[in-house]
Image: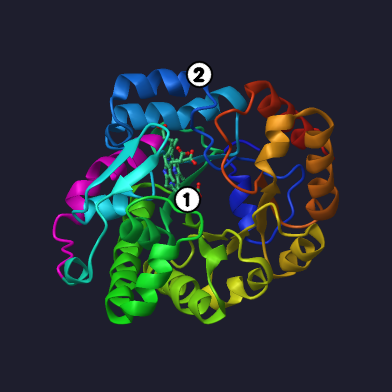
Amino acid sequence: MAGKRMMLDVLKGETVSPPPLWMMRQAGRYLPEYRETRKRAGSFLDLCYDPDLAVEVTLQPIERFGFDASILFSDILVVPNALGREVRFEEGRGPILKPITAAEIAALNGDMFHVNLEPVYETVRRLRAKLPDETTLIGFCGAPWTVATYMIAGHGTPDQGPARLFAYREPEAFGRLLKALADHSAAYLIRQIEAGADVVQIFDSWSGVLDEPSFEAFCVEPVAEIVRQVKAVHPDVPVIGFPKGAGERYRDYRAKTGITGLGLDWTVPLSMARELQRDGAVQGNLDPLRLVAGGKALADGVDSILRTLGSGPLIFNLGHGITPETPVAHVEAMVKMVRSQR
Ligand code: CP3
């Protein structure tokens, strides 16, 4: 079926067999050709803001594995960076930001936001022109809560203690930060769609650390706000939400936020995933470490997902990003297993 973007059919609720397939973090350090380009780029952010190189690394996993979808190469932290916050990535330490204060939140300024992100929009335009017609192009942003956790702590933490404490102590400043992030993230996604993205995904990687009212206020509401703003301009463009670690709260996340497709982390039981599939497409949810291990661990994982979810709207993916130590041969094996499903 030349020219058909299967993932879009699945997001409309159709069952496609074998299911469309891509991987979170599919362009990354497990690929020798990525490590090569990354060396030439200098810093990680230089790579994100250089359309020549960003296009090159985005296409690498498509050329190698023929995935059904291609995700723009960038990072969720370009949004705070475009709002004027200092961001850098240190080898082995991950992202480092200047922690934001309540006073700095009040002074956040988005005047240069789209100017700063123009290289990302240029990357999306070039990608849509270069990708095979049948390959879905995915744009993305971080959810306000997850982005805020890095802006407040200044680095990754295991339980997002600094951001949770800030939210309780400075509710007004924190609310203002979430609102600024939701508005700018919506504008960012709209520009990506206008540059050629077919689908957008909102990554809420740290939604699993919050109590119930905080989850509602910090995860559900800001994502619902982004979806409202995007849908007001592009009602037909599907939005995938990925509230990693949301557990039981996966159940009404789609209804409450207005997202189209639901990204499942690997801890979501397949029996529950099957129920969630009644309301629309689900995406996931192979444990990335099964892919590292390969062999029977991988085959069993792929098999149970296909057996349980393959007869409904499914986008096959990992339950989180692929890790750098993953052997390329295991990715090849996974692609074969998924594609040989009937
Ligand atoms: O999926 C893709 O292939 C597209 C690119 C992409 C990256 N980051 C590239 C990247 C996407 C979609 C992201 C999202 C992202 N970034 C998230 C949400 C998803 C998730 O993984 O939970 C988060 C929390 C970030 C922030 C971030 N960026 C962290 C914590 C780190 C360091 C951890 C690590 O893996 O090193 C990054 C760096 C990063 N982003 C790398 C890549 C390929 C590795 C850095 C490098 O190449 O030097």
* Amino acid under disc 2: Pro
- Considering the image in quadrants, where does the N terminus appear? top right
Q: Where is residue 101 in the image (x, y as percent from the top left)?
A: 22, 66
The residue that disc 1 covers is 198
| Left or right relative to 249: residue 142 | left
Q: Is residue 100 above or below residue 286?
A: below
Where does ligand 1 appear, by image quarter? Answer: top left
User: Front-most of 273 and 77?
Assistant: 77
Q: Residue at horizontal 35%, vertical 68%?
A: 182
Q: Quick check: marks 1 and 2 in contact, CB under 8 Å?
A: no
User: Front-most of 5 and 41?
Assistant: 41
Helix, strand or loop at mark 1: loop
Instruction: Look at the image and say whether residue 121 sits in the magenta stretch.
Output: yes
Quadrant for residue 337, please give it: top right
- Considering the image in quadrants, where does the C terminus appear? top right
Instruction: Look at the image and say whether residue 50 sits in the magenta stretch.
Output: no
| Left or right relative to 36: residue 215 | right
Mark carried by residue 32: 2
Q: Residues within 10 Å of mark 1 (few under 14, many from 20)?
A: many
Which stretch is magenta? 107-127
The majority secondary structure of the magenta stretch comes to: helix
| Residue mark closest to the camera, 1 vs 2 | 2
Q: Is residue 155 above or below residue 147?
A: above
User: Front-most of 330 and 283?
Assistant: 330
* Amino acid under disc 1: Asp
Q: Residue at horizontal 30%, vertical 33%?
A: 51
Q: Is residue 341 above or below residue 14?
A: above
Helix, strand or loop at mark 2: helix
Q: Position of residue 28 (x, y in %)?
A: 48, 31
| Left or right relative to 237: residue 246 | right
